Image (cartoon, rainbow, N blue to C red):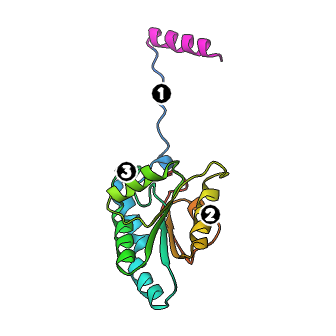
């Protein structure tokens, strides 16, 4: 059906007063409530403080954590621009224990990304974003972690909500936040 034919069809239906059923969102497509998401994130991050203590006690040079930004460090879907409390607390604890707080994001611009997370309260020791040559989200995240390790960082924890945030390597422990089968990007 062409665009013109489709428009004419719906105009005739509307003029005739014929009601068409609304397309309801499938129940399995709905995201959980904001509070449920925060609870799910807190459950994943629950062992973060103990892990940081344990990892710090084992020593190492330039210990660091890496955070994704959207729907990880920031509540991009639920409360844009605001920090995700369990992740912010993890970052602050890491910083207080001497870890560097680094970011790996598919955002296109480093300065605006740095401004967004620092404005939400995060310490920022490094920001790595998408590059023209990256083939996708996973490639960006892997390149960023590789660059950080080449700079001498030991990435002790990597936090993200998408599988692409955790693909590859160059980190010791991953924290996979909920993305609800890819529905929360």
The image shows residue 63, relative to residue 148, as above or below, that is: below
Mark 2 and mark 3: Cα distance apart in space: 27 Å
Q: Of discs 1 and 2, which sits in the foreground?
A: 2
Disc on the earlier residue, 2 or 3:
3
| Element class at badge 3 | loop
Q: Residues within 10 Å of mark 1 (few under 14, many from 20)?
A: few
Q: Which mark is residue 142?
A: 2
Mark linked to residue 21: 1
Sequence-wise first label, 3 or 1: 1
Badge 1 or badge 2: first in the primary sequence: 1
> Considering depth in this image, is 69 or 14 the residue closer to the camera?
69
Q: Which residue is mark 3?
A: 78
Residue 94 in percent (x, y) is at 39, 76
Return the residue nearer the eye: 56 or 111. 111
Residue 75 visible in the current orientation: no
Mark 3 vs mark 1, foreground winner is 3
- 10 Å crowding of disc 2: few (<14), some (14-19), many (20+): many
In the shown orientation, is residue 184 left or right of residue 164? left
In the figure, 57 relative to 140: above or below?
below
Q: Is residue 27 left or right of residue 87?
A: right
The residue that appears at 42% across and 77% down in the rendered structure is: 48
Q: Nearer the viewer, mark 2 or mark 3?
A: 2
Tell me which segment is drawn in magenta. Answer: 1-17
Marks 2 and 3 close (CB-CB < 8 Å)? no
> Residue 57's quadrant in the figure?
bottom left
Q: 37 or 53: nearer the eye? A: 53
Q: Position of residue 130 (x, y in %)?
A: 57, 52
Q: Is residue 133 visible?
A: yes
Name the residue nearer the viewer: 153 or 28.
153
């Amino acid at each position: 059906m062409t665009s013109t034919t489709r428009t004419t069809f719906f105009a005739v239906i509307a003029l005739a007063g014929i009601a068409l059923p609304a397309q309801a969102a499938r129940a399995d497509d709905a995201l959980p409530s904001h509070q449920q998401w925060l609870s799910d994130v807190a459950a994943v991050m629950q062992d973060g403080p103990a892990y940081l203590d344990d990892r710090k006690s084992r020593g190492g040079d330039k210990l660091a954590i890496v955070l994704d930004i959207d729907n990880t460090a920031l509540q991009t879907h639920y409360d844009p621009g605001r920090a995700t409390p369990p992740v912010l607390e993890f970052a602050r604890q890491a910083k207080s224990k001497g870890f560097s707080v680094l970011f790996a994001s598919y955002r296109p611009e480093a300065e605006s990304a740095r401004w967004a997370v620092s404005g939400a309260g995060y310490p920022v020791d490094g920001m790595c974003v998408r590059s023209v040559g990256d083939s996708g989200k996973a490639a960006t995240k892997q390149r960023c972690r590789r660059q950080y390790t080449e700079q001498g960082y030991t990435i002790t924890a990597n936090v993200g909500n998408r599988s692409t945030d955790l693909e590859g390597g160059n980190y010791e422990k991953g924290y996979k936040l909920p993305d609800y089968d890819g529905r929360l990007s």
